[in-house]
Image (tube, rainbow, N blue to C red):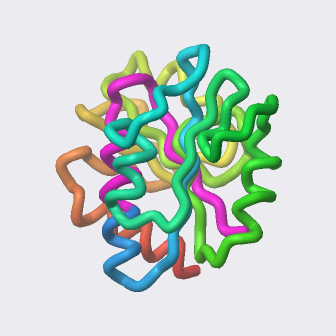
């Protein structure tokens, strides 16, 4: 299964990036699933105005959110990402975008607001790109692309090129 992760801290722009990526992929004819990790403790809100509702509205054929043991397919269990991906493997998806689950080992797009965020996230495995709110000097020597949050056209095209490979 072609799985990508978008990780970063709360209010860094993860859901907005996933939304834009899903919309772009859907426009190009891809069938996309999304999974959001609700890392704030307890059950996620059960309503259409939440992030997974936004993913669905952007064109995802499957959209879910997991937190506190509840996968919003209304199935209560202590869900792991591999279990959720197993369910998604039954669906006709071209790729899946996972929002969160920082410690999983899929290709990651890391969104950081500043150098302090980057210092706390730079140790993650399988980083393939970084999107920053502001320039960060320590990112200039990295072996992967670094995009400004304002370069939406550029990073969305890069993401789609990577998915196509």
Q: Position of residue 98 (x, y in %)?
A: 57, 49
Q: Position of residue 104 (x, y in %)?
A: 72, 40
Q: Does 104 sit above or below residue 159?
A: above
Q: Does 42 sit above or below residue 118?
A: above
Q: Does 81 sit above or below residue 76?
A: below
Asked if one can make out residue 140 in the rendered structure from this viewpoint, the answer is: no
Identity of the residue drawn at 70% across and 33% down: 103
Q: Position of residue 91 (x, y in %)?
A: 68, 71
Q: Nearer the viewer, residue 42 or 151?
A: 42
Identity of the residue drawn at 66% across and 48% down: 126
Image quarter hosting the N terminus: bottom right
Q: Position of residue 3 (x, y in %)?
A: 65, 60
Q: Is residue 138 left or right of residue 16?
A: right
The part of the image, by quadrant, that contains residue 112 is top left
| Residue 108 located within the stretch drawn in magenta | no
The part of the image, by quadrant, that contains residue 92 is bottom right
Asked if one can make out residue 73 in the rendered structure from this viewpoint, the answer is: yes
Identity of the residue drawn at 34% across and 30% down: 12
Q: Nearer the viewer, residue 131 or 142?
A: 131
> Residue most toward the bottom?
29
Q: Is residue 124 left or right of residue 146?
A: right
Identity of the residue drawn at 60% across and 15% down: 42
Image quarter hosting the C terminus: bottom right
| Residue 8 located within the stretch drawn in magenta | yes
Q: Which residues are magenta?
A: 1-21
Q: Does 132 sit above or below residue 22?
A: above
How many numbered marks, from 0 up? 0
> Residue most toward the left?
150
């Amino acid at each position: 299964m072609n799985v990508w992760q978008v990780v970063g801290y709360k209010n860094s722009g993860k859901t907005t990036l996933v939304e834009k990526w899903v919309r772009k992929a859907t426009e190009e004819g891809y069938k996309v699933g999304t999974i959001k990790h609700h890392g704030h403790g307890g059950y996620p809100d059960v309503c259409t105005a939440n992030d997974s509702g936004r993913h669905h509205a952007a064109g995802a054929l499957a959209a879910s959110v997991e937190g506190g043991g509840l996968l919003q397919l209304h199935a209560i269990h202590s869900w792991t990402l591999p279990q959720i991906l197993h369910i998604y493997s039954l669906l006709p998806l071209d790729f899946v975008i996972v929002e969160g689950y920082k410690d999983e080992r899929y290709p990651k797009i890391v969104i950081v607001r500043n150098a302090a965020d980057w210092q706390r996230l730079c140790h993650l495995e399988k980083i393939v790109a970084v999107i920053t709110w502001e320039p960060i000097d320590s990112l200039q020597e990295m072996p992967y692309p670094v995009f400004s949050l304002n370069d939406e056209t550029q990073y969305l095209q890069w993401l789609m090129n990577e998915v196509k490979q």
